[in-house]
Image: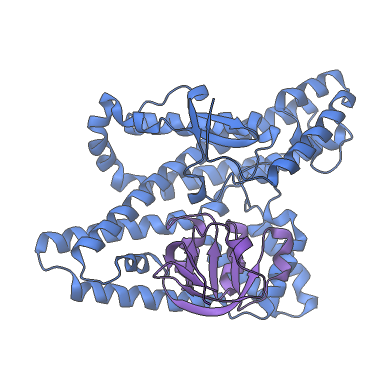
Chain colours: A purple, B blue
Amino acid sequence: MIQTLMGIPASNGVVRGKACIVVDEKHFKEFKPGKILVTRQTSPAWTPLLGVAAGVVTELGGQLSHAAIVAREYGIPAVVGVKNATKLIKDGQIITIRGEEGTIEQ
Amino acid sequence: MVWSRRWFDQWEWYHRPVSPMEETLLLPEHINQTTNLISRRLGIKFPPPQETWKVIDGYLYLSNQYPRLWLQSPTLLLPFRFWRELGQVKNRWTDEVLPNYQKEMNQFKQVDWSDLNTKDLLDLIEKIVKREGEFLAEAVYVVIYALTTEVVLKLAYKYWVKDRNPLNYNELLIGYPDEGIKAEVELWKIAQSNRTNQEKALAEWISQFGHRIQDKDILYPTLGEQPQLIQAYLKMYQAAANPEERIKVAVARRQARERFVEKHLLWFPPFEFLFHKIKLLAQDYARIRNSRPFYYQGNYLIRQILLTLGQQLRWNDDQIFFITIEELKQAIRSGSNRELEQKIQQRRELYEQRLAQVPALEVEI
């Protein structure tokens, strides 16, 4: 059964791929290019990760947050404001982000 | 009184507990400078600091009474004042604020700390904090205009452009060069080069971009102080495409969106004229907004001076950030830091506990 998480549409596009949960900067080295970044919130330190990610999901933030602005700049789908995303999505899980609708399908 | 963190998820700063040094040395000056600047330019009067912001359980909160700001008589003149400033703010930022700030920061960087005693070091810190506060106030002021012009563009796009997805307005604001892109491109090039050239190139990159703040709180090291983080970036970039290619795609998307607007803008000459004006303003401000983390240079200097003072007091690592500025001055006067060591340890443990918690969205005190 497909479970759908709802959030705020932040950057258009659809991507399906493996989620990589990164909770802080100490775990940046675990992030591999092409994965979907799932985190609590981003800041300028996270910009290089967004540059190599296939998509972004954050727990906090709105359409003018850092993750949203950078994701749009980089043309990757993003959904922000997804409550408990880092707990509900498992590391390595295949998910589909629909940026325009603000949904994540597990 | 109710204190709120309602808007914090939109910002990149202060997601984590505030360190005692940040709370006592920088926050009061910086918030004060910002509210004073907004008052001077836009006429809005802010309540006193104790009614504006507060650190509760380690986290920064703002008063939820901010709608009251609209209930004062100067608000009647706000649209005119805002409009009057609209064309000036970005020019002032690029032609006066940035060059003057850079000039003063360069002077601060040239000071030889080894020649200064502790009193002089403290004076220097306070001068840099004050200057950083003035700069931060200008940066916040510019962001107010950046946000406003983006919101106005969003509304204009929604109502005047025939588009199934009104969020597509975002594509009109992408693809402009900024300091962040520049830093990424240079780091990517270093990641592609062979190891013998990397060390020198990386040192130059750090001297140019390393002062970037990762978080506003003075506790947090700047980018250049985190070699492991930079190595993680380098490793990522070895397998990634050149960021310049990404920018070319963003430029193409923006140009395609501009062509779309030309075809689908509601035909009514005043709308066309206004839409283009709004679009140009929003684009100018978007460029300024995205570069801001690279402009703040004071944190790096303040950190280095504080760490130097910490070493003089025989403290390790970041212990100095877990005391207040008054406690630091007292420790320097008395020449003794023993009574503070236990406090530092307790505060650090409390900080770690709070870091693991999610702060309440609103608190009533």
- The image quadrant of residue B276 is bottom left
Q: How many marks?
A: 0
Can see residue B246? Answer: yes
Q: Position of residue B183 (x, y in %)?
A: 59, 65
- The image quadrant of residue B29 is top right
Q: Position of residue B65 (x, y in %)?
A: 41, 30
Q: Position of residue A104 (x, y in %)?
A: 50, 70
Is residue B315 shown left or right of residue B27?
Answer: right
Can see residue B110? Answer: no
Is residue B226 shown left or right of residue B70?
Answer: right
Q: Closer to the camera, A102 or B220?
A: A102
Q: Position of residue B362 (x, y in %)?
A: 51, 36
Q: Residue at the location (26% across, 57% down)?
A: B155
Image vertical order of residue B12 relative to residue A6, above or below: above
Is residue A27 shown left or right of residue B184?
Answer: right
Image vertical order of residue B204 relative to residue B80, above or below: below
Image vertical order of residue B34 relative to residue B240, above or below: above
Q: Residue at the location (65% across, 33% down)?
A: B57
Is residue B25 shown left or right of residue B140?
Answer: right
Q: Closer to the camera, B241 or A41?
A: A41
Name the quarter where the C terminus of chain B is drawn: top right
Single out the residue that lies furthest toward the front.
A1
Single out the residue that lies furthest toward the left.
B268
Q: Closer to the camera, B23 or B61?
A: B61
- The image quadrant of residue B161 is bottom left
Q: Residue at the location (79% across, 28% down)?
A: B118
